[in-house]
Amino acid sequence: MTDTTSTSPTPAASGAAADINAVSLSVNGAPYNVAIATDRNLSGVLRNEMGLTGTKEGCDDCECGACMVLLDGQPINSCSYLAIQCQGREITTVEGLASRDDLHPLQRNILAAGGVQCGFCTPGMLMSAHALLETNPEPTQEEIRIGLSGNLCRCTGYAKIIEAVANTAAETPVAPPSAG
Amino acid sequence: MSFTIATSLDDALAALADGARPIAGGTDLVVGARQGKDPLPQNLVAIDRLGELARVEVTDSEIRIGAGVTHAQLMVDASVVDHCTAIADAAALVGSPATRNVGTLGGNVMNGSPAMDTGAPLVVLGATAELRTASATRTVALDELWTGPGQTSAQPGELCTALVMPARPATSGSAYVRLEYRRTMEIAVVGAAASVTLASDGAIESLRVALTAVAPTILEVTGLDDLSGSTVDDGLLASVAERASGQATPITDLRASDRYRSKMIGVMARRAVEAAAMRARGEAVAVPVNRATGVGAAE
């Protein structure tokens, strides 16, 4: 669970900096403290303040899903989510998938299946797929399509991406439900 | 600008009294601001962490859905699916999974779009909106709440805290269907919700139908009382379709012409009544009807 004990960002005291807020959030398990304006979107803060450029900015209109990240485990469009609303919360981006030496199984499978062409949609696709498999380790074809339905790809025709998600599910032993 | 994260409803109402505007998922507010429709309000209070707004409560007499319940919750919540199936049908069609994860029922209602998917279901289920300020609570009928496209009669400082519906007999069913060109990030071309209660002989005891995206606000079809006592057959469905098409006053925009909308709203109304009647008889029609019956966009 997230820490909600200190959820009121403290606006800077006065003057020209009044719109700058101190925001603390966790990204891929690491704590970050940023000073940002109220209207900053999460994708911009991830890319510019934190240097996490895996999250892409596509339509900036919640249509394409290139900016998909997980907020407390659930996919959101980070282009249109205020970064200040993430105070005290856990964000997962595509940089959080791979371990030091190994690609995440979804990353390995999307490469193996040929589900990456230009690659611009891939981080968002991976985040939607990851959230899907976390909640539904054995999705049907239809459930995979719904899970990825907020992510547009203009290259692959989707079939190989769906195949990669199905392959990942098939090779992952279904663990008994665990806490968290 | 100021931004506070409310940790209690009292916090939120105090901030609203000071002129702040509420934000939950921001799926209309922030998207609209980034599109340049309306600038972000100068003062915002986040209400998405308020557990008291995120509950579904069922008693013998009513079902109360907190304004902060997300679409993702609505589409799977057992009480909503059982008692207000049309709302679950609608919630499952809103936006994309990402939209549904943070977008809320209260946000959909108070954004006041005539194309809102949850609006017609709420109308046919007899919902009222609960609006609160720091000092008062009032209940508003939905046809008094929605005053025009994107407009409500809510006063500054008022927060929609819940949508409340009367309990319905076991022989009732409801459904929502919409015409769509694609399955995700779609706005209803037209849509229809129906609620049906059947008498013991299978005839209609009561029937309500409401329409999406064919008028400046969600439009309830009037004059259906004479259909009570009828059986749900082709003749009845044709009559409902004709009345829906006749009462709709749609516009032409990039999604459809007014003539096409008028024709199609009859088809959607017919299918909504058909699915609601099946559910009233206890026949399984999966949520959402659009996917269960192939009404919407094809593969």
Image (tube, coloured by chain):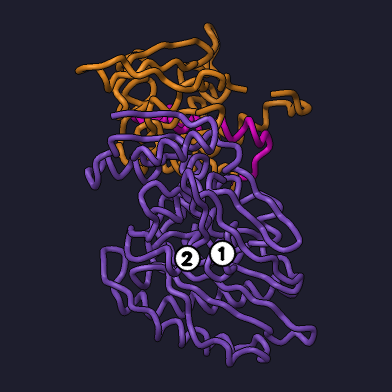
At 54% from the left and 33% from the top, the residue drawn is B8
Residue at 62% of width from left, 22% of height from top?
A: A1
Pointers 1 and 2 within a single chain:
yes
- Residue, disc 1: B127
Q: Chain of mark 1?
A: B
Which stretch appears magenta? A115-141
Rendered purple, the chain in question is B
Q: Which of the two discs, 1 and 2, labels the residue nearer the N terminus?
A: 1
Picture coordinates of residue B280, whole percent (x, y): 71, 73
Nearer the observer, B99 or A36? A36
Q: Amino acid at mark 2?
A: Leu
The answer to whether the residues at label 1 and label 2 have Cβ atoms under 8 Å apart is: yes
Q: Chain of mark 2?
A: B
Mark 1 is surrounded, within 10 Å at the Cα level, by few (under 14), some (14 to 19) or many (20 or more) other residues, namely: many
Farthest-out residue, front: B135
Picture disc at residue B142:
2
Q: Amino acid at mark 1?
A: Ala
Residue B208 is at least partly visible in this image: yes
- Left or right of B92 on screen, residue A43: left
Quadrant containing the N terminus of chain B is top left
Task: Give SS at disc 1.
Answer: loop
In the rendered view, tell whether residue B56 sits above or below residue B142.
above
Name the quadrant containing residue B229: bottom right
Residue furthest top in the image: A100
Coordinates of residue A65 in the picture (x, y in percent): 40, 37
Residue A123 shown in magenta: yes
Q: Secondary structure at mark 2?
A: helix
- Tell me, what hue is chain A? orange
